[in-house]
């Protein structure tokens, strides 16, 4: 004869229903979060893989931050270079006028004043700031790219710009330095746009000098300067395209990462919902059975 223990029955039934409720709660959590794993012990191998995927995504987010900064700085540089090209174009128009022998001293002096103003405008552009508030064309320096020294403008930045990591072992230089934009060679001699504009402006405003000859001589320098700026624009454009390419590759990798995370640790909502409904049905039946059995006269008599 089997001896029944009321306390043992209640303990066993309570434990079984508690287990059912716990499993049902876990399924409800999976449905609400979309995650199959609530703790590493659910599936240690899958949990380890999910941690690796999370670290990969974190690194990708860092690369995205660098990429966004590089893109912003390159766009700023591209816009600034367009302004420099406009300054050179206007300077060339004025120089052609000054080279025309029909202009008198007053007209050439006026042209010289405008060239002087163009030089000041060039300084403002070249001392612009990048997205971090540092010198746009100053390399690694945080201050201005150019300063007035001894009556002429001198480059005070560094020789190189710090590259930014884009991921996959790739990087990009988010700009160009001042000399890469303004320095060029004419007839075997190195000069820069500041000197060309400043020297021509001074000659045209000095009636004792031959402004017409100086203007004719400056045209070659302005052409060389415009070519240097165009080259810098090409470099910036290529780097912008490289950033875009790396962005596309990173987005594709992130999508694959997300898909794998969903496969490894994601819950099948439809399947989990069906299992939850089944579990709730079992739990409800167990509770009803417990209530009926608990009220049997046999239990009342024991």
Image (tube, helix red, strand yellow):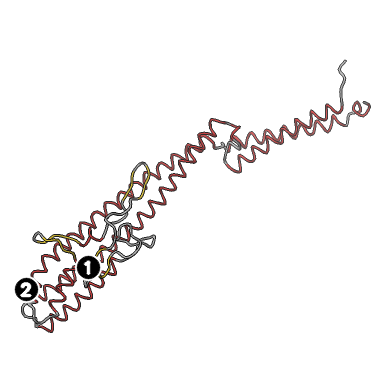
Q: In which quarter of the image is the N terminus?
A: top right
Question: Residue 186's quadrant in the figure?
Answer: bottom left
Q: Position of residue 7 (x, y in %)?
A: 86, 28
Q: Position of residue 103 (x, y in %)?
A: 9, 81
Tell me the crowding category of disc 2: few under 14, some 14 to 19, or many 20 or more residues within 10 angstroms, Cα based.
Answer: some
Residue corresponding to mark 2? 213
Q: Is mark 2 on a helix, strand or loop?
A: helix
Residue visible at 30% across and 56% down in the picture = 175
Disc 1 from disc 2: Cα separation = 24 Å
Which residue occupies the extreme front position in the image? 150
Q: Where is residue 119 in the image (x, y as percent from the top left)?
A: 22, 72
Which residue occupies the extreme bottom position in the image? 106
User: In the image, is residue 300 above or below residue 157?
Assistant: above
User: In the image, is residue 82 above or below residue 255?
Assistant: below
Residue visible at 42% across and 52% down in the picture = 65
- 123 relative to 190 in the view: left or right: right
User: In the image, is residue 230 above or below residue 293?
Assistant: below
Which residue occupies the extreme top position in the image? 1
Which comes sooner in the sequence, label 1 or label 2?
1
Q: Where is residue 230 in the image (x, y as percent from the top left)?
A: 20, 59
Question: Residue 234's quadrant in the figure?
Answer: bottom left
Residue corresponding to mark 1? 86
Residues under numbered marks 1 and 2 in contact, where contact means CB atoms less than 8 Å apart = no
- Name the one closer to the observer, 62 or 150: 150
- 132 relative to 159 in the view: left or right: right
Number of disc labels: 2
Residue visible at 28% across and 67% down in the picture = 125
């Amino acid at each position: 004869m089997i001896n029944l223990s009321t306390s043992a029955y209640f303990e066993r039934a309570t434990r079984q229903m508690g287990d059912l409720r716990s499993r049902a709660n876990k399924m409800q959590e999976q449905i609400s979060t979309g995650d199959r794993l609530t703790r590493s012990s659910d599936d240690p191998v899958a949990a380890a893989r999910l941690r690796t995927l999370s670290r990969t995504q974190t690194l990708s987010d860092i690369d995205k931050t660098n990429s966004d900064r590089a893109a912003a700085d390159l766009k700023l540089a591209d816009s600034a270079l367009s302004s420099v090209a406009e300054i050179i174009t206007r300077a060339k128009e004025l120089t052609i006028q000054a080279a025309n022998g029909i202009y008198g001293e007053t007209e050439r002096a006026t042209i010289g004043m405008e060239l002087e103003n163009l030089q000041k405008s060039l300084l403002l552009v070249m001392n612009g700031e990048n997205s971090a508030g540092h010198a746009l064309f100053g390399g690694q320096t945080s201050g201005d790219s150019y300063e007035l020294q001894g009556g002429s403008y001198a480059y005070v930045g560094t020789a190189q710009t710090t590259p930014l990591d884009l991921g996959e072992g790739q990087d990009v230089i988010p700009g160009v330095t001042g000399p890469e934009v303004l320095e060029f060679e004419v007839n075997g001699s190195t000069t820069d746009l500041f000197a060309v504009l400043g020297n021509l402006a001074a000659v045209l405003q000095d009636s004792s000098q031959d402004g017409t000859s100086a203007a004719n001589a400056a045209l070659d320098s302005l052409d060389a300067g415009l070519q240097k700026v165009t080259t810098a624009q090409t470099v910036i454009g290529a780097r912008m395209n490289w950033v875009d390419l790396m962005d596309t590759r990173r987005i594709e990798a992130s999508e694959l990462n997300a898909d794998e995370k969903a496969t490894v640790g994601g819950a099948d909502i439809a399947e989990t919902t069906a299992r939850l409904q089944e579990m709730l049905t079992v739990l409800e039946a167990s509770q009803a059975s417990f209530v009926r059995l608990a009220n049997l006269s046999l239990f009342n008599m024991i």
